[in-house]
Image: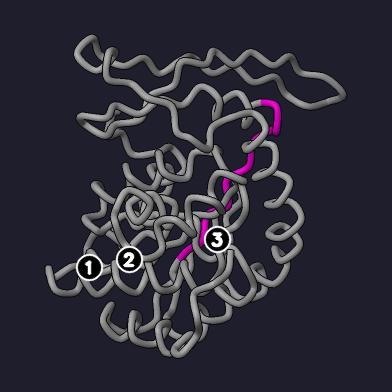
């Protein structure tokens, strides 16, 4: 694991205003367990440096269903910083009566990438709300996903660490199709039992289901975009539009691949 010592930070408020200015004037008409993950706990130096100041600025990357939210949410509690997932921001907007709801519904249901303009707008609003509550630092989940987003992020703040999570596509598809959400508590569970045999030198993968407690079982729902057709389209777009930019991110940020 590489450890990048932090440079002085700008505030969340400045960060929010900076990324907003990059898209100002643009029309938005485009598309349980609280264990510390092993890759963090194995490096005590990283833990001491980051938890002492409590204002880490980390990014979690990876294709849909890889587990960004699981690790980021656990680490956010451990480090005392907010976990900000752009996917969650999109879904919150979808469930609102805001002006973007109908536009986003069509994009998400087709498995398309949401445009930079919309993502920046939602992220800026979330950062401003956090600043008002006194939040310091962040773990970004799923941002950046394009070169434009990466350029903005690199230009307005110093990111301490970028973690890129990887998993076989067969496992990703099974994980996404098995995801369930409790409509009452909001926690995520998974009904899939993944058992992929190793072949051609690749290791096998076994993942137990993540069952919901009895009180949540009757309240479980499946996300509208967790259908086989939509998930496959999301993975295809990720490969085409995101992975091709990975060398750029490696140049801009220190990246750990897991």
User: Of helix, strand and loop, which one carries label 1?
Assistant: helix
Q: Mark 3–mark 1 contact, CB under 8 Å?
A: no
Q: To which quarter of the image does residue 46 belong?
A: bottom left
Q: Which mark is residue 53?
A: 1
- Whichever of labels 3 and 2 marks the residue nearer the N terminus, that label is 2
Image point (83%, 25%), residue name: 201
Q: To which quarter of the image does residue 217 belong?
A: top left
Q: In this view, which residue lies farthest toward the right?
A: 200
Q: CA distance from mark 3 to mark 1?
A: 34 Å
Q: Which residues are magenta?
A: 161-170
The answer to whether 1 appears left or right of 195 in the picture is left
User: Of helix, strand and loop, which one carries label 2?
Assistant: loop
Q: Position of residue 128 (x, y in %)?
A: 24, 75
Q: Position of residue 95 (x, y in %)?
A: 32, 48
- Disc 1 vs disc 2: which is toward the camera? 2
Q: Residues within 10 Å of mark 2 (few under 14, many from 20)?
A: many
Residue 204, compared with residue 23, is above or below; it is above
Tally of numbered tags = 3
Quarter of the C terminus within the rendering:
top right
Q: Mark 1–mark 2 contact, CB under 8 Å?
A: yes
Q: Residues within 10 Å of mark 1 (few under 14, many from 20)?
A: few
Residue 220 belongs to the span the image colors magenta: no
The answer to which of 13 and 217 lies nearer the viewer is 217
Q: Which mark is residue 114?
A: 3
Image point (12%, 68%), residue name: 133
User: Of helix, strand and loop, which one carries label 3?
Assistant: loop
Image point (50%, 81%), residue name: 27
Q: CA distance from mark 1 to mark 2?
A: 8 Å
The answer to whether 132 appears left or right of 143 in the picture is left
Write down the residue under mark 2: 56
The answer to which of 79 and 212 lies nearer the viewer is 212
């Amino acid at each position: 694991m590489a450890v990048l010592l932090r440079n002085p930070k700008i505030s969340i408020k400045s960060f929010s205003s900076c990324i907003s200015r990059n898209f100002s004037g643009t029309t938005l008409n485009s598309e349980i367990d609280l264990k510390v993950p092993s890759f963090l706990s194995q490096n005590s130096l990283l833990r001491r440096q980051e938890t002492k100041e409590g204002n880490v600025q980390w990014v979690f990357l990876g294709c849909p269903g890889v587990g960004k939210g699981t690790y980021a949410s656990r680490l956010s509690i451990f480090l005392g910083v907010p976990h900000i997932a752009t996917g969650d921001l999109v879904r919150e907007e979808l469930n609102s009566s805001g002006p973007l709801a109908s536009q986003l519904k069509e994009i998400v249901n087709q498995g398309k990438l949401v445009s930079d303009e919309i993502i920046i707008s939602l992220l800026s609003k979330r950062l401003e709300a956090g600043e008002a509550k006194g939040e310091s630092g962040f773990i970004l989940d799923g941002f950046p996903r394009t070169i434009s987003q990466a350029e903005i992020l690199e230009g307005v703040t110093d990111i301490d660490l970028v973690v890129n999570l990887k998993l076989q596509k067969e496992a990703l598809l099974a994980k996404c199709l098995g995801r369930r959400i409790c409509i009452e508590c909001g926690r995520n569970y998974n009904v899939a039992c993944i058992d992929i045999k190793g072949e051609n030198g690749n290791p096998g993968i076994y993942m137990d289901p993540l069952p919901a407690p009895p009180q949540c079982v009757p309240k479980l729902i499946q996300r509208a975009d967790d259908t086989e057709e939509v998930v496959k389209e999301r993975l295809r777009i990720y490969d085409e539009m995101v992975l091709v930019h990975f060398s750029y991110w490696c140049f801009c940020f220190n990246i750990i691949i897991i």
